[in-house]
Amino acid sequence: MNETIVSMQGICKSFPGVKALDNVHFELRSGEVMALLGENGAGKSTLMKILSGVYTRDSGSVEIFGQQCGDLTTKQAQALGVAIIHQELNMCPHLTVAENMFLGREKKKGFMIDMKAMEAEAAQILGDLKIDISPSEMVGNLPVSKQQMVEIAKALSINAKVLIMDEPTSALTAKEIDELFRIIKRLRADGCGIVYISHRLEELQHIVDRVTIMRDGQYITDMNFKDATMDEIITHMVGREIKEKFPRVECQKGEKIFEVKNLNAGHLVRDINFSVYAGEIVGFAGLMGAGRTETTRAIFGVDPKTSGELIVDGKTVTVNSPMDAIKAGIVLAPEDRKKDGLCTKLPIRENIALPNLDLLCNGLGVVSKKKEDDMCAKAVKDLHIKTPNVEVDAGSLSGGNQQKVVVGKWLARDSRVVIFDEPTRGIDVAAKVEIYNLMNQLKQQGIAVMFVSSEMPEVMGIADRIIVMCDGRITGEVMARQTTQAEILTLATQFENKFAEDAV
Ligand SMILES: Nc1ncnc2c1ncn2[C@@H]1O[C@H](COP(=O)(O)OP(=O)(O)OP(=O)(O)O)[C@@H](O)[C@H]1O
Ligand SMILES: [Mg+2]
């Protein structure tokens, strides 16, 4: 037990303009869970993509189960027992769950694909994971959390001995995370080596044995998890100490900026009423599926409303589309950045400039290159977006830096209401503080800030007032400084229909 099963030495990898990995060293033993930690853009995903055959290295050596490996293809890596669950979901939405799980290694009966056998095996693996999904369901019909579980089931179906999980919990519910941890522990007991990448540092204590820390494409250190404090780990990751994880600024509560009256939309936005005042951040807490994202989408005009009134600075505004919302001074940084927030195939420059063309045009309707340059430079600087320049495609940025671009494009506007839906998902500790500071900055400018988050410590640490939702309704409101996690959780589970609780 516990022999070295993966050894990577002197790994280098460059992309145009970026040295993503610089002489990196990494070792994994059997029967251990290794957390691979580092800030956004540190090179974690790149290193693991090399191990799993997605990328080829420029130099360095890779040894898997004592076997020296040249450039691997993904198929060869799989044959050696290496499976990876990617950070960004990459399922084919138009194929079924079983088809996705066996993509590229379909079961055959003669020349024909044996769908029955694939569905039977898929059902067995899903059942084992206690995931209630039919193998014949189209993946595109599943919510993100379920797609993520299918991704995990897929990795398990190849009988992995080295399992890499890149941010596996970013879209899972609390119950699904428990299930995932149970599976991880079982695999570890079976002698599997697991690489676990996560920016949710508080979850590491439940499963992690060792940590490897990277910074700016370099190996910094590795150590036993129990020998290190969280502050030490963070200092290694960031290269400096982070004193305040939740910097809160005190502001005088001012006038009412934004009011939502009797908002109804779909079945998850039911009779929503609330106000946001100048000088405060209003947090929206609740379990996944409570209707918070749906509420933000209805406000921003993405989804149609069945009724409701929006009032900005005392005036009723009509919002039937995001364009209307932006004109009325309401902007949204959405939860699913890949789908709604970012054009991954366009450069950073265009992602930032496009929604702001009205501000960038001169009197003749021509875009001023100078204004565009300034706006982009400011966003990159204010949010510390890690990129060689603004001409690279947004899709090539690390996950956290993509998120910063989503937020960055709204910074230039004189908005009155800024809605952040899970803005820190997949973002490293230092960048989280930057996003909080950004929200604080808006709050100090008298802008109404709405902050949807599923992470209790950050809502309690950053928001002033917290509105709790359950089942599409507001079930309570508490002051952040005076409340407890237990109180919020009680409000977040006030289901009208008791059976719905099983869905948590
Ligand atoms: N396909 C690519 N093309 C160009 N640059 C890339 C590509 N993939 C990664 N990079 C760059 O390599 C560096 C390392 O990125 P990587 O995705 O490995 O970071 P990470 O540690 O996984 O970050 P995060 O925590 O944000 O996911 C970044 O600067 C990123 O922009
Ligand atoms: Mg990554």
Image (cartoon, rainbow, N blue to C red):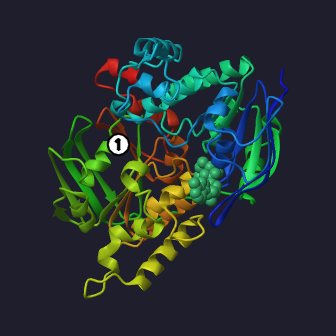
Residue found at x 35% / y 33%: 94
> What residue do we see at 46% from left, 13% from top?
110
Residue 87 in sight in this render: yes
The answer to whether residue 55 is above or below residue 411 is: above
Q: Is residue 24 left or right of residue 357?
A: right
Task: Judge left or right: residue 341 versus residue 401.
Answer: left
Considering only vertical position in the picture, is 460 above or below 504? below
The percent coordinates of residue 316 (x first, y second) are: 16, 62
Q: What residue would you read off at disc 1?
A: 292
User: Residue 195 at what x, y percent from top left?
Assistant: 69, 35
Q: At x 35% / y 69%, what residue is drawn? A: 354
- State the SS at label 1: helix
Q: Position of residue 472 (x, y in %)?
A: 29, 36
Residue 317 picture quarter: bottom left
Front-most of 204 and 85?
A: 85
On screen, residue 291 versus residue 483, left or right, reads left
Q: Amino acid at mark 1?
A: Arg
